Amino acid sequence: MTGRSTPPGPAPTGPDDRLELDALAGEFVLGSLSERERRDADLRLETDPDFARLVADWRRRLAPLDDSVPPVAPPADLFARIEAQIAGQIERQNETASAPVLAAASMSPASDLLLRRLNRWRAAALAAAATSTALAASLAALLLAPLPETEPVVAGQKYLAVVNRDGAQPAIVVSVDIETGIVSLRDLGAEQPADRSLEVWYLAGDGSRPPLSLGVLADSADITHLPVRDADYGRTDAAIAITLEPKGGSPNGDPTGPVVYSGKLIPEPR
Amino acid sequence: MPDVADTLAAEMAFDLAPLISATARGDRSAFRALYDATSAKLFGVVLRICRDRDKAQEVLQEAYVKVWQNAARYDPASGRPITWLAAIARNAAIDQIRRGRVQSLEVVQEEGELEAIADPAAGLMGHADRSTLRVCLGELEDIQRDCVVLAYCEGYSREELAVRYDKPEATIKTWLRRGLMRLKDCMDRE
């Protein structure tokens, strides 16, 4: 075994557990799992190479079933719509960030590197879970937090927030990279009504400044990239909150909807 | 006249992997080529799960945006390119129907379709994996096979299968898992 952190769910130790994990992988590929189990399996897929292998095997075994489906030409304008959606995302990233344009480009193609990064995120998730219940589920309460000590922003430092609701499963992992100027949000299963947007806010924690909008979570993407805005991400009580807003984001620049997820910002372990 | 599936299979014969890696580098024309080569197949897959053309279009759009964003994560060691693409599309479709679909599923299933999928003589032979899967599906008990095929092809959840067969979800789970494990034993043996 390697020294990676334990994935969610029971660790596969014996043959029975192994069988259980394999059956879970099979049902994940079938698509028959409950929503909750599906979300857990999704997360596990990112963090547990054993599980990922089992899933890949099931995909290979069952793929021939896709061959029995007659191909159907999609509408002629669909590709244009896909391009428009991608272009919109790129444009938003380019507004202030000069760094890599594509979501994919900022990620290492080496999957083990990605896994290491995700495992660090997981470790941070556990650390953050301990404090997340202390974070109130409203901006007001967050803003009333005691005056924090501030820490200087370290060049090249990254900050992380694992945002969730009331200490439940992490919903979104937020990574602030000062060096590249990109805030990456990895959606691990946040619930987003189709007619609303999830808006991301930086909170200083002591009310010294109003909530700063970092942007809106992409509708249908696993990863959203937003430009880093000027703020003290290393501040002790700094936090990320996510509110439910009208489609496209708050109409007036201040949060108008309820906080659905929140999490404390912490320096990423190097 | 050549079978549509065969034509498609021939088109698929050229390697999609370089198109995916070019897409990962931000090459739009490679992305377009990838879309042209695969979108009809994926739309078919998605349409069968969603059953609604508008929803299926949204799902396909979402799937290709994900392909663009995640192209760098494709690992050839984990499977064929088309399997990876289909997994993204199926995931998006299942997410979509879990959000929207209510329990009272209309059964649009034509009688005999399940048999056609599992029947080795259905005319889609020739591909080794395909025939192995068919043979092995044929070895399952009818109810296990139907549950596996309905879940994979039509996006039935355990809950929906429980309604369809008027059984507790726990029973469905057992059928699915027994079916999967027998399938695996058979396929690994073949």
Image (cartoon, rainbow, N blue to C red):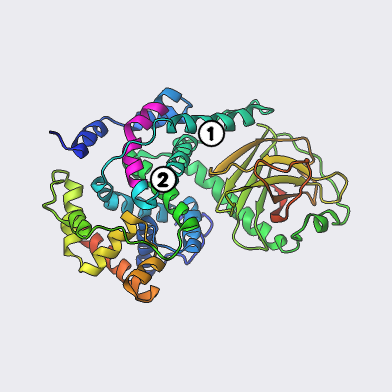
**Lateral position of residue A229 relative to residue A191, left or right:** right
The residue depicted at 67 percent of the width and 27 percent of the height is A95
Name the mark on residue A85: 1
Q: Is residue A268 visible?
A: no
Report the number of discs. Answer: 2
Q: Quadrant of the C terminus of chain A?
A: top right
* Residue B106 point in image, percent of width and height: 36, 61
The correct choice, above or below, for B158 with respect to B13 in the image is below
* Residue A248 point in image, percent of width and height: 66, 40
The correct choice, above or below, for B156 with respect to A238 in the image is below
* Residue A72 point in image, percent of width and height: 31, 39
Residue bounds of the magenta highlight: B31-46
Task: Verify CB contact (< 8 Å) between mark 1 and mark 2.
Answer: no
Name the mark on residue A232: none
Label 2 sits on a secondary structure element that is helix
Nearer to the camera, B62 or B182: B62
Give the letter of the chain under mark 2: B
- Residue type at the position of mark 2: Ala
Label 1 sits on a secondary structure element that is helix
